[in-house]
Amino acid sequence: MLFIKRLLRCIPLLLLANAVWLCGAVGLWGIFLLLPAVAGTLAVHLKPAPTEPFATRRLRILQGGYELLYLFALCFLLECGFWGLTFTLKSITFWVNALVSILTLFLLLMNGLLRIFFSSSQVGILWRILLLLFWWLPGFNFWLIWKACSTARREYRFELAHLERTAIQASSGRCRTRYPLLMVHGIFFRDWQLLDYWGRIPGALQANGAKVFYGRQQSADAVSRSAQELCEQIVHIIESEGCEKVNIIAHSKGGLDARFAISHYGMDRYVASLTTVNTPHRGCNFVDLLLRILPGGLLHFLAGRYNALFRKLGDISPDFEKGVRDLTAARCADFNRETPDCPGVYYQSVMSKLQSAFGTIFPLCFSALLIRRLDGENDGLVSTASAVWGNFRGVISTPYRKGISHGDVIDLLRENLKGFDIREYYVQLVEDLKNRGF
């Protein structure tokens, strides 16, 4: 049925593409056929497909992009057949008609590509560059267009399903917890306003009724100092919101920062629950390995360059080396002995894993291979065994080759994972906290 609809939308495009031949074949009657062909072509360019409920403006543009590319491919194949039937080397009509046809198809192709270029979040930079460079190359361009169409279509269906689910469930307040959420980032990042560490996750939580705040600690520092910064943010939220406590969701090293603040700085009276996500509670043997093999001079050099850069990006006094050393297995073993859980706080943990070491970006693909040899399954930085703390909610992954990396689990690259919606996972996680009375 969808193919028939696309074929019907091709009719005005094909009529306009063969305007010269049509007028030559039927005379003035061809002009009367061209008027609806022009109107139909404009309609296809402006609205390539029916608008579906819940689709945002971006998604409508995206849908139009891949529909136009599908129409381009279909029209191109039909035109090739028509050219083969009408080909006459000495016919001026044939060559002029071919020129008009190529122009019509080119406009169709450009409209589709531009829509996808400016609306898709899943067609990556590499595919954009390849399309820009090789859209004209026969054979290869069709493969590129097919890849772009497939990716854009999956993105459209994925995002539309998420919007439909959110619209239906938003009124239920699934994430309207008793206490606000405090989302705590890991090492080597900051809570920038324009580049959210947690990707699209906070938006999904807020759409379902959650009140979200951020840890705002420096990008790299010793656990004890990062915990002090967290304390300041927790107290600020308590005072500004007039609430009794907060629910902390912390990723990676942020989980250690939160545990330290709760156990050592008296924040247990202000924290209802702590959910750690891919946190190396027992350290990273990969970090131990790097610290053993890296020359001391090189480590100091890298630390100096990092600290200088992040001072310019907003940190007051970042300390790369102390932050990294607090992630070693020995340091974490001492940390666990000295940092007992507080009875009044609910502790739980989650962990993701990669199915394939090459299911993530460079350089995590190589660290994933090393950690697999050292500690078994991992997310590219943290082993599964190291992430277990409190009520362990299990390992999350996808049934496909990629799995879920250390960055994927916080939606860092805003990538739609096949077979898994990370935003819905967090919605369910927070909904469970609500149901527990937090």
Image: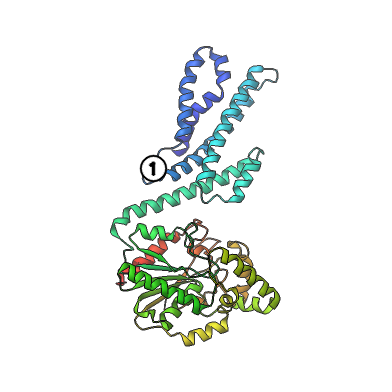
- Where residue 266 sits, quadrant-wise, is bottom left
Q: Is residue 4 above or below residue 290?
A: above
Q: Residue at x 57, y 44 (%)?
A: 146
Answer whether residue 392 is visible to the viewer in this image: no
Residue assigned mark 1: 52
Residue sitting nearer the eye, 80 or 151 = 151
Residue 251 on image: x %, y %: 48, 70
Residue sitting nearer the eye, 130 or 189 = 189
Q: Quick one: which residue is furthest to the top in this view? A: 28
Residue sitting nearer the eye, 312 or 34 = 312
Q: How many marks?
A: 1
- Where residue 106 sits, quadrant-wise, is top right
Answer whether residue 112 is visible to the viewer in this image: yes
Q: Residue at x 60, y 73 (%)?
A: 371
Residue sitting nearer the eye, 311 or 264 = 311
Drawn side of residue 431 relative to residue 215, left or right = left
Q: Is residue 230 above or below residue 63?
A: below
Residue 168 on image: x %, y %: 32, 53
Q: Quadrant of the C terminus?
A: bottom left
Drawn side of residue 244 relative to residue 60, left or right = left
Drawn side of residue 28 relative to residue 244, left or right = right
Circle 1 packing at 10 Å, graded few (<14), some (14-19), many (20+), is few
